[in-house]
Amino acid sequence: MAEDNVPDTRPAPPATAVRLTDLTKDFGTVRAVDHAELVIQEGEFFSLLGPSGSGKSTLLRLIAGFESPTSGRVELAGRDVTALPPHRRDVHTVFQDYALFPHMTVEQNVGYALRVAGVRKDERRARAREALATVRLEDYGDRRPAQLSGGQRQRVALARALVDRPGLLLLDEPLGALDLKLRQEMQTELKQIQRTTGITFLLVTHDQEEALTMSDRVAVLDGGRIAQTGPPLEIYDRPATAFVAGFVGVTNLVRGAAAQRLTGRPGTYSIRPERIRITPLDDGLETAGPGERSVTGRITDIAHAGPHTRFRVRLDEGGDRLTVLRLNTSGPALPARTDTPVRLAWDAADAYPVPG
Amino acid sequence: MHLTRTARVVLGVLMAAGLAVVHVPLLLVVLNSFNADRSFAWPPSGLTGEWWVRAAHSQGVRDALWTSLQAGLAATAIALVLGVLAAFAVHRHRFFGRQTVSFLVVLPIALPGIVTGIALNAAFRTVLDPLGIGFGLFTVIVGHTTFCVVIVFNNVAARLRRIAPSLAEASADLGARPAQTFRYVTLPALRSALFAGALLAFALSFDEIVVTTFTAGPGTKTLPIWIYENLARPNQAPVINVVAALLIALSVIPVYVAQRLSSDSAGGRL
């Protein structure tokens, strides 16, 4: 046929790595996942963010195949896998407890996926060593998992899941057990590995900072429902619900009469603490600029947190309380004692309306 | 808990006395199997290996030892298969009557041996006799299996509870079929529990007498039965001591090894 000879120059549409359609999972009377709809593109670093009990781990287990949905469909790379058991899905998981096989060496652990697939022993060893090199553990192949530190076990679990380049890598709170410094190192390393391998990563976490810093896109879960899906900045700046505004970052949620007083409009608004300017009331310099809202109040609480200071301010009019974040950069002296009268000001556009 | 010096000494002495009451008589049996004096005069006038040689040459003892080994090995083998299956059923699956099944499997070890014996005797008479299967080694094996299963079941069930469920999930997640997961992950994790269970089951079968009495045919003599039947014959007394010492050894060693195995695996190997 003639059309076959014409080269297709249109860019290929991004392939879908995961598609969840109307996915629901009940445990007895508890609905863990509630009509979830989700599309993840190939090569994305995607995070499921939510508090414990929000259904994010169940969602992960439904994708891996450890649980079967009550209703709905799971598609991986365009194929319906809803009825397939875990061992027939092109997905590997990095477990929260790492789940390394205690009776095998590190190298045997890493080569396991190849062993059960019937790969010859010498090739298995070579590829296991290669995978260990990507996580900088090439000299640890002969050790047992029990002889490794937490961070090393975590990297072995990662190498084991990456050894045969699955179409999708699931990470279930992989950094939860590590201390802060190691966690930040691993965040960088995970991101690096994701970029170089090009494998789709799906990370489950309750740590909003982790989700925001690492992901291309984030889905926020609230009580089994996906409350919002989008790039990190969009989720932070334009939260779709009051829950998202409160869970992703810290915010001042004002509603009802307080909203009327502070924004001049009815509804519910989210004002981020770092968007509020705080100045001493008596300096006589600060007044509201054009398009700004300005109120006065007194400091009730001060918390110094190194690079920034957090203030709680009780407003003179209406008695509402607002949290204000001030970076400790050079500048005019900041009010440093409780009960100091202060002026708060913010751009009217920074009071972002949220439904509910 | 803090104890005063006196309390520690008193408790220590009591502990030693308690252990002595249990173990000194056993020690005497072993010593007497080397006692040169036929009437076991104390202290022994000399030590001799004569009784051991005689026991080794006694056809009755040799037959009984062989019977005991056969019964113990067969009962242990069957118990391994059934016990593992039952432990997996109860651990892996949630089904109606799960607790009941678990309880019924363990019950035989709590029942008095004489009750199990009578019940099995009656059952064999009713069921096996019409089929032409008489009382003999086979019925002894069935009888011993009833309590050997419990030991294997308990060991395996306890281990299964300790294995992180994520291990089997990780295996499946990495592409292993259920049979591969069992072979490469579950079985190695169970290995020492299986070995410990088998040793204990064998030890239990090897020195069992009550159930054996009711399930053995007239020609089937295990070692304990042989001792029991020869107790009344004074000229057999030295040989009985030898057989008793043998029974002690063959029961103590497996129990000791089994205990080492279970405590090993209870340690931080995971």
Image (spheres, helix red, strand yellow):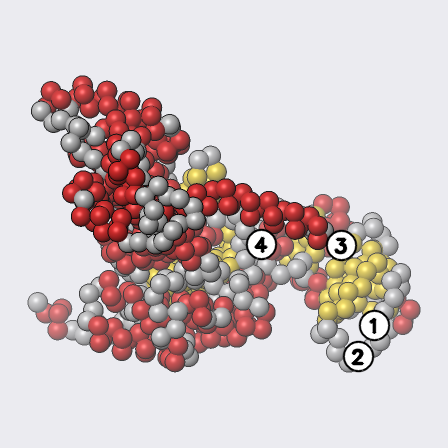
How far apart in space, not on screen, are marks 2 and 4 (Cα)? 33 Å
Q: In which quadrant will I find the C terminus of chain B?
A: bottom left
- Mark 4: which amino acid? Val
Crowding at label 3, few (<14), some or many (≥20) Cα neighbours within 10 Å? Answer: many
Badge 1: chain ID: A
At x 36% / y 70%, what residue is drawn? A106
- Which of the two discs, 3 and 4, sits closer to the camera? 4
Displayed quadrant of residue A153: bottom left
N-terminal-most mark, 3 or 1: 3
N-terminal-most mark, 3 or 2: 3
Q: Which residue is mark 3?
A: A262
Same-chain check, marks 1 and 2: yes
Q: Which residue is mark 1?
A: A334
Same-chain check, marks 3 and 1: yes
Mark number, residue A244: 4
Residue A157 percent across, percent down from the top left: 40, 66
How far apart in space, not on screen, are marks 4 and 1 (Cα)? 31 Å
Q: Determine if residue B153 is in view.
A: no
